[in-house]
Amino acid sequence: MSQYTKLFVAIVLVTFLAACSPNSQHNVVVPSLSTRQSFFVQAQISAGNILAPDDIIPSNPPVVSACDRFIQSLPSDYIHGFLKVPENKEDPQSPLISVFYYGKLVDGQTPIVFFNGGPGEDSHGDFRTLYQAQKTVPSWNFISFIYIDQRGNGCSSFYPQGSDPATLARLRNYGSRGIVNDAEAVRVKLIGDKPWKAFGQSYGAFVAHRYATLYPKNLVSAHSHGGVITSSAFDRLKGRIGSQNRVLAMYFADYPSDEVSLLALNQYVNGKCFTDQTSKRKTCGLTVIASMTKFLGFTDQWLKIHKWLQVMAPEGVADDKGILQYLQTLYFPQTSDPNNDKSVANTVIDFVDRNVLSLSKENCMKVYTALKAEGADLQHALLNECLLPLSRADGPPSVLSQQVQTLAPDLLTLADFQSSLASSKLPFYLYSGQKDVYVPIEDFAEELSVVKDLVIYKNFLSTGHDGFWTEPLVWSNLQK
């Protein structure tokens, strides 16, 4: 980076840290996507596939439920069904919920139950990704995947709605323990008392850890990509923010002109707001581009990030039309039912199941301080999840967050995981990606120091959060 660019970045950062307020003088109304288009966009993003500006988005067909439409799209040789399971396995009075499963059973092959990322996502996007990947290599096509829509998502029963104490207590059952118990019910339904394999990606990798801890004897092997157990929520957040700074530098090495485009966008969006014409949702200032951080971890999508930056700031000049196109396509997609809210459930699961630290200004300042003490250059950071909260003032804790803090955690510990592997001798394959900004290599050090040679570990140098389907070694190990 040139001295001129460094000076320019510093000026820009100082400017945009005064984030846009709701009373911004500049407001642009953003046209909405149709419901069908929104479903398509969200399914693609959940699978790590960013729609490029020139991608064809399907037109809006006659209204069919998303679940019915998905079931109709399944390959003819796939099975599918619904199981009634207790919301809380330990409570005989617990209400029953419906869990949707589907996949292909191959004669002579041990099925692999697949757990997708999230929480709060269905399995459909990852199914499409893996299904297409299986077509490319003949041996991969014989792998027998069984997919489950995690409770609360997709075609399974939706999360209980509300934030009253009774509902929060129910939502406590929707984390990894409940998902694993659902998988056990599906296993018995499909193959009886035989064991199968578990494969988890991102949050699904955490679910695979829970499975290996709770029911190791019911697994032939477990495979975990992009997910680990960490005891410190702060260290995990620090690793995540630090990795975003590190991986962005790698991205600029591949697309050097995009540094100028990102600089221009940071400067341009300061003081501007954009409003979706249907939902009336408004986004201002840095929120316009903050969503791009999540795309950085999928290296197979970097070309599409480049295309969007060229649309939003061609030749380093921000363009209103291009920014509107980006927001319409990737930032403001609508859901079919605004009453089906996942935010409360995700807040509960983050606290009870995952020990996640919020992206508050206070926490981000602590992270920045720690990273700077370790020698990280954050003065010229152009894209990470802390830039937005650092530009705002922290408000008082929400009523919901205070209520959630009263729930009893159900955290999976490294000690329990290590003990289970040591006694069961279960083959456990653990993978990380050098360019992952979701669960980066920095987060793996603690688990590896505890489990040591109880896992088979591999760090992929050329991929990020997408390595679960692009790395041949993963597929090879699944077939063992």
Image: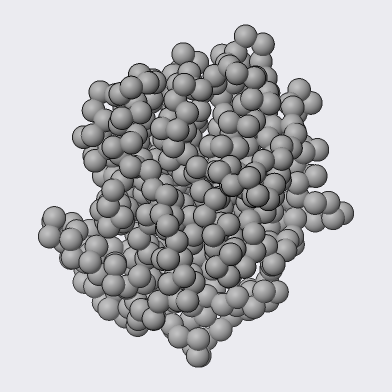
**Whole-percent x and y of residue 233?**
31, 55
The residue lying toward the viewer, choosing from 189 and 203, is 189
Give left or right: position of 285 versus 124: left
The residue lying toward the viewer, choosing from 243 and 16, is 243
**Residue drawn at (33%, 22%) of the image:** 423
**Residue drawn at (50%, 28%) of the image:** 198
Quarter occupied by residue 340? bottom right
**Residue drawn at (39%, 40%) of the image:** 227
**Residue drawn at (80%, 38%) of the image:** 72
Q: Taking 197 as reference, is 267 above or below it?
A: below
User: Total number of numbered labels?
Assistant: 0
Quarter occupied by residue 110? top right
> Which residue is at the far right?
62
> Which residue is at the far top?
108
**Whole-percent x and y of residue 39?**
69, 53
**Whole-percent x and y of residue 36?**
75, 55
Residue 429 is at least partly visible in this image: yes
Give left or right: position of 137 versus 258: right
**Whole-percent x and y of residue 239?**
27, 51
